[in-house]
Image: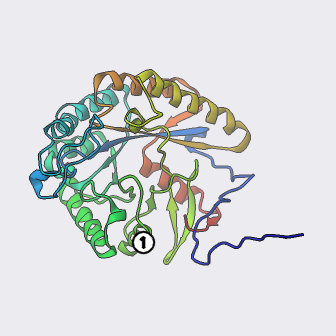
Amino acid sequence: MNTFSYSAPPQSQRDFIGYGRHPPRIDWPGGAKLVLNPVIVYEEGSEYSLTEGHGRNEGWGEYNTQVGPNLRDLGTETHFEFGSRVGIWRLARMLEELGLQATVSATAVALDRNREVAAWMIEAGHDLLGHGWRWFEAWDQSREEEREHLLKAVALYREVLGHRPIGWNQRSFPSVNTFDLLVEEGGFLYTSDPCNDEIPYFTRSSRGRMLVVPYSKTFNDSRFLVSPGYSNPGDFAADAIAGIDYLLAEADRIGGRMMTVAVHARWTGQPNRASGLRRILEHALATPGVAIMRRDDIARHVLEHCADLPTLPRA
């Protein structure tokens, strides 16, 4: 009888086990069973553009139509402009009306180009999730170029906001160098690049360990532009509300849960899609056991009160 055994490659750093069958119980502030983190993604003005010598146009516009590479894509350019001129302020008004603080995942150049957005973040008490110097793909950069962009981003955040980010999330997904560069830089308390869990966890680093506050591509308005995805705001709202209710019920059995809902200024800043986000947030506010928290506050709570969580292998 033939037998076959498999051994993982020696360089593999993937973890398919995580917390496993019995995850640790996390107690959230105020006895909350589920913490919901709303993330407003702000990238406008930092995307690829022929006008800035990038040799290409940005592809994540409202429509799946590519212009160029030698011609300006005025449609996509103005779509991004809508996000900074109109969309971000619609979302700002919504948060103010609901009395909420959110996390803003912004690129440094985007904030530099519209410093009124930075001023609003400071005045309203929203926290910053570092999202890069520009909205470029880290996985396509050399280690040296990615390091340069990271340091330029931190410096520009300090100039525009008066403080640096303590958390990080690359465009789409990180490179193989991102984690080590964050540890090397030395000022980050957590990373949000992985999407592989529903509660925070610690992972090994060259300086001891790093906190991971997982992100989500599931409850994310990018699904309005992918297939299969959301065809209308009701789809987004129903999807996220179902997630809230399920996680809340599950928390009774296995302990505190976490959920990220991420939206972009140029997409959910549109009035129809904004209605879907409002339904999600109003449902969370009306549901006992749900707390809406900034990402930095989630990270600091775990670092202060959950330091005994096990350290998991690198993700």
Q: How many marks?
A: 1
Give the residue number, with chain letter if any, for mark 1.
Answer: 183
Q: Nearer the viewer, residue 231 or 99?
A: 231
Check the image and report above or below for 133 versus 3.
above
On-image quarter of the N terminus: bottom right
Q: How is the image coloured?
A: rainbow
Q: Nearer the viewer, residue 32 or 240?
A: 240
Tell me the SS state at disc 1: helix
In the figure, is residue 140 to the left or right of 16? left
Residue at (20, 51) in percent of width and height: 46
Residue at (11, 47) in percent of width and height: 71
Check the image and report above or below for 88 versus 211.
above
On-image quarter of the C terminus: bottom right
Provide residue 36's location: percent of width, then percent of height. Answer: 50, 38
Q: Amino acid at mark 1?
A: Val
Residue at (29, 76) in percent of width and height: 144
Residue at (65, 64) in percent of width and height: 310
Residue that protrudes farthest toward the front in the picture: 1
Mark 1 Cα-neighbour bin, 10 Å: few <14, some 14–19, many ≥20: some
Provide residue 288's location: percent of width, then percent of height. Answer: 58, 27
Residue that protrudes farthest toward the left in the picture: 51
Check the image and report above or below for 201 versus 104.
below
Provide residue 308's location: percent of width, then percent of height. Answer: 64, 63
- Picture quadrant of residue 89: top left
In the figure, is residue 5 to the left or right of 91? right
Provide residue 264's location: percent of width, then percent of height. Answer: 32, 38
- Picture quadrant of residue 85: top left
- Picture quadrant of residue 268: top left
